[in-house]
């Protein structure tokens, strides 16, 4: 017998009235610190626009490095021009042999894998937990014989780096945290980026800490820190004692490097923005808790699961997972429907790297030998957790959480409205059924 169709309000995507008045603006991004213009002008008038300039007083780059090391609770910070560059020099600093393997989550931005190739290594994709979006200890396959694990803190969650390290340490694998989406997140009081051997950050425009384009590597490893300096500054390190009028970088040349240096304007901007970051975290995290409470009773919808050890969130992208979705209502449709209801860009995650058009090393002749190994090691591998999150979740940018309670109420109302439509098309909704089917609880 056919089940009766449940009534559902007409969606804005179908011509119905939207949840949010189009005249009500959303917070914009980026938001500059009040003293950002003065910080940039101070660089403009300093005569030092790059770290390769003669010494005339402290560089903004060195000031930011000290501030960010303190913020992450690490001894060293080496700024870079991009987050991708941070990943490359972190991998190079390990001194691995050409062609050795590095584990990389299947659900992340392509730079996590392409940086491995740029470092002369082979990325091996591993699946993520569909409840957390992060790699767990069960994903570490010792038969792969990898020498490093690049663990990504995804969207607004943190991977369990201590548990991962307990598996990787006996295998001789170094853990590098890709914390590009986790500035200020904490695990039992320790900052993201400080839990592994190295931590890498991106300061690209969309990130919660931004200077337009930038990056950084942090570490507590006394041996790796000077190597990182050389790898990002053409084999040069800072002078122990600067001299007026002399170049601040000297040719120490223990290893061959490249030029990945962060400029002074970007460094000065980061100094200003970093002082603003925790106040922004407080606003976003309070709003997230309000949204979580509002969605807790909506059937067929869930947020990422955060481990209790993660005692501070850093919201970069906020996934909302729809369990399940009818075949004719994919998450791209959900994203369009929510965008129409809210008047803000709602979007889907990228496809897993195993299917990404951005990760095709065989198209680049200079990495052909690595590409052949990449293709060979991935034959027959599947990524059900990554595939599930990629096809069942939608994302909101963190800027939407810099507003007030009304904004969260509107998001909740729009999600419930769309979920009602989905339920009306689903005979027997079972919350979380599909993730359980791929072997996770």
Image (cartoon, rainbow, N blue to C red):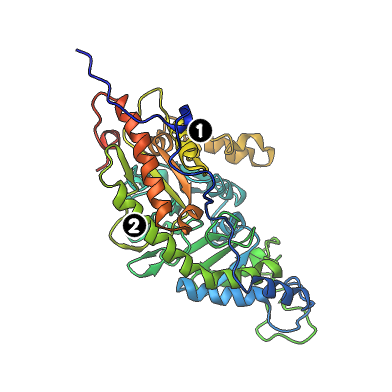
Q: Where does residue 142 sit, x and y in percent of width and height?
A: 36, 47
Q: Secondary structure at mark 1?
A: helix
Q: Where does residue 5 sit, x and y in percent of width and height?
A: 27, 21
Label placed on residue 285: none
Residue drawn at (74%, 87%) of the image = 243
Q: Residues within 10 Å of mark 2 (few under 14, many from 20)?
A: few
**Residue 440 position (above or below residue 276):** above
- Visible residue check, residue 337: yes
**Residue 342 position (above or below residue 245):** above
Query: Toward the viewer: 198 or 368?
Result: 198
Q: Where does residue 81 sit, x and y in percent of width and height?
A: 66, 61
Q: Residues within 10 Å of mark 1 (few under 14, many from 20)?
A: few
Q: Where does residue 432 sit, x and y in percent of width and height?
A: 27, 38
Q: If the image is split into quadrants, where does the C terminus sit?
A: top left
The residue beneath circle 1 is 355
Disc 2, disc 1: CB below 8 Å? no
**Residue 349 position (above or below residue 57):** above
Mark 2–mark 1 Cα distance, whole angstroms, equals 34 Å
In terms of image quadrants, where is residue 334?
Answer: top left
The residue beneath circle 2 is 289
Residue drawn at (58%, 34%) of the image = 357
Q: If the image is split into quadrants, where does the N terminus sit?
A: top left
Query: Toward the viewer: 141 or 216?
Result: 216
Query: Toward the viewer: 280 or 115?
Result: 280
Q: Earlier in the sequence, mark 2 or mark 1?
A: 2
Q: Residue furthest top?
A: 1
Query: Toward the viewer: 74 or 401?
Result: 401
**Residue 85 position (above or below residue 342):** below
């Amino acid at each position: 017998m056919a089940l009766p169709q449940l009534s559902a309000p007409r969606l804005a995507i179908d011509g119905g009235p939207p949840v949010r008045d189009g005249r009500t603006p959303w917070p914009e991004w980026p938001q500059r610190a009040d003293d950002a213009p003065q910080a940039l002008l101070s660089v403009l008038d300093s005569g030092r626009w790059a770290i390769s300039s003669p010494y005339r007083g402290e560089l903004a780059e060195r000031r930011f490095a000290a501030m960010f090391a303190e913020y992450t609770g690490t001894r060293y910070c080496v700024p870079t021009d991009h987050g991708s560059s941070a990943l490359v020099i972190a991998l190079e600093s390990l001194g691995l042999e050409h062609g050795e393997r590095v584990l990389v989550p299947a659900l992340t931005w392509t730079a996590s894998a392409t940086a491995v190739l740029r470092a002369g290594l082979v990325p091996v994709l591993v699946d993520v937990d569909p409840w957390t979006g992060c790699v767990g200890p069960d994903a570490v396959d010792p038969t792969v014989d990898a020498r490093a694990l690049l663990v990504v803190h995804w969207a607004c969650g943190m991977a369990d780096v201590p548990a991962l390290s307990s598996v990787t340490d006996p295998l001789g694998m170094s853990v590098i945290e890709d914390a590009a989406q986790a500035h200020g997140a904490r695990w039992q009081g320790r900052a993201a980026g400080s839990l592994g051997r190295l931590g890498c950050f991106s300061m690209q425009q969309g990130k919660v800490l931004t200077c337009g384009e930038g990056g950084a590597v942090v570490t507590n490893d006394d041996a790796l820190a000077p190597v990182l300096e050389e790898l990002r500054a053409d084999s040069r390190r800072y002078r122990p004692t600067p001299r007026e009028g002399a170049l601040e970088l000297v040719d120490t040349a223990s290893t061959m490097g490249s030029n990945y240096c962060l400029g002074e304007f970007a460094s000065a901007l980061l100094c200003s923005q970093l002082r603003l970051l925790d106040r922004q975290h407080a606003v976003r995290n309070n709003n997230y808790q309000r949204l979580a409470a509002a969605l807790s009773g909506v059937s067929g919808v869930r947020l990422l699961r955060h481990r209790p050890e993660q005692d501070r969130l850093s919201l970069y992208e906020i996934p909302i997972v729809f369990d399940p979705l009818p075949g004719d209502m994919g998450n791209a449709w959900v994203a369009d429907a929510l965008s129409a209801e809210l008047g803000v860009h709602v979007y889907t995650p990228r496809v897993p790297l195993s299917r990404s058009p951005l990760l095709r090393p065989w198209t680049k002749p200079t990495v052909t030998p690595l590409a052949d190994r990449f293709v060979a090691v991935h034959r027959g591998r599947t990524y059900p957790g990554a595939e599930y999150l990629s096809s069942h979740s939608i994302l909101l940018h963190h800027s939407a959480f810099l507003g007030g309670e009304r904004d969260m109420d509107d998001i909740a109302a729009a999600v419930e409205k769309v979920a009602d439509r989905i339920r009306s098309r689903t005979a027997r909704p079972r919350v979380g059924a599909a993730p359980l089917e791929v072997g996770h609880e």
